[in-house]
Image (spheres, rainbow, N blue to C red):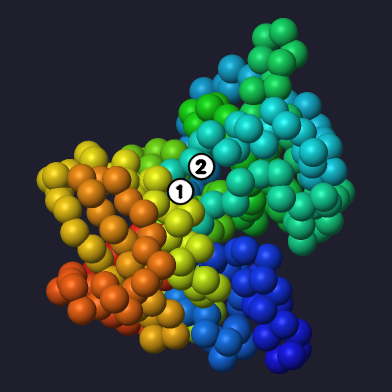
């Protein structure tokens, strides 16, 4: 496994990848330079606190396999999670990665004329009174909550549990305006982990977005160089009034600029905007 992990990082670098993110339940990958990426947030809401209004959508029973490869559902998910740190742009896998496999229960949410306007990938509880477990969904947030309320009452559930729900997502934002519980789990050696594969490649991929954010900031007119060091790698950002490019001679820039970020692999946390970044 050690050799496979080392070879995979080498292959990623050779193939032009800049950054690697994994979700791991134990500390194994920290030995290969992976560090904490962001905390995992989970939410719980009692069934009695979910909307009681009837959904304005119809439910069509389906499974995880039915959701795979649908461009309309992928586009819906991507649109709603566009600003969520660490989200994957779908489609990703050719088959379902759900723990229950491709037969995992799901629902398509359809409108008045049968058009698909959302989905829920949520296995019901095995026994009445247990928690309803929310895995994945997309579509109008209010309608999703109405559907979950209806399903939770149908199965006599005590409440609905949202595992690893992104804090900044629409659904989590709506839940925080209701009666709910939120759990934030920080793990320095597990959960979501991140590692820079190639610093320069990562910065080139981010240059456009960094420039757009600089243009909207109080530093829109700034000009200069920013040196970034991770211990193993160096790169320099040449900044000309929010126009960014990645330099090829960081050693030369080191003698010219006092503006620098120096660290280890934790520099990756800053690049992706780990919450909160000052940590």
Viewer-closest of 91 and 264: 264
Residue at 62%, 63% in the rendered image: 16
Label number found at residue 84 = 1
Label number found at residue 81 = 2
Q: How many marks?
A: 2
Mark 1, other Cα within 10 Å: few <14 / some 14–19 / many ≥20: some
The image quadrant that residue 236 belongs to is bottom left
Residue at 43%, 44% in the rendered image: 83
- Where residue 101 appears, as percent x and y from the top left, is 83, 56
- Where residue 52 appears, as percent x and y from the top left, is 51, 28
**Residue closest to the far top:** 113
User: Which structural element holds mark 2?
Assistant: loop
Verify CB contact (< 8 Å) between mark 2 and mark 1: yes
- Where residue 117 appears, as percent x and y from the top left, is 64, 23
Viewer-closest of 28 and 59: 28
User: Which structural element holds mark 1?
Assistant: loop
């Amino acid at each position: 496994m050690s050799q496979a992990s080392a070879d995979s990082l080498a292959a990623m670098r050779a193939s032009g990848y800049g950054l690697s993110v994994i979700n791991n339940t134990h500390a194994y990958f920290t030995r290969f330079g992976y560090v904490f990426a962001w905390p995992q947030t989970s939410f719980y809401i009692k069934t009695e606190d979910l909307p009681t209004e009837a959904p304005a959508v119809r439910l069509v029973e389906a499974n995880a396999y039915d959701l795979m490869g649908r461009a309309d559902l992928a586009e819906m998910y991507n649109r709603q999670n566009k600003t969520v740190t660490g989200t994957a742009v779908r489609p990703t896998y050719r088959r379902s990665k759900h723990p229950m496999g491709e037969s995992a229960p799901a629902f398509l949410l359809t409108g008045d004329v049968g058009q698909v306007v959302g989905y829920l990938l949520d296995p019901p509880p095995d026994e009445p009174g247990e928690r309803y477990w929310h895995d994945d969904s997309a579509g109008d947030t209010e309608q999703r909550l109405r559907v979950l309320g209806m399903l939770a009452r149908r199965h006599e559930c005590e409440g609905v549990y949202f595992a690893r729900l992104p804090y900044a997502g629409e659904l989590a934002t709506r839940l925080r305006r209701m009666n709910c519980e939120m759990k934030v789990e920080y793990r320095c050696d597990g959960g979501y982990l991140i590692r820079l594969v190639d610093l320069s490649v990562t910065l080139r991929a981010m240059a456009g977005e960094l420039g757009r954010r600089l243009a909207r900031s109080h530093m829109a007119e700034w000009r200069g160089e920013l040196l970034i060091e991770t211990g193993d790698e160096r790169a320099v950002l040449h900044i000309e009034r929010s126009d960014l490019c990645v330099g090829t001679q960081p050693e030369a820039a080191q003698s010219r600029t006092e503006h620098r970020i120096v660290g280890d692999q934790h520099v990756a946390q800053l690049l992706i905007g780990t919450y909160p970044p000052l940590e």
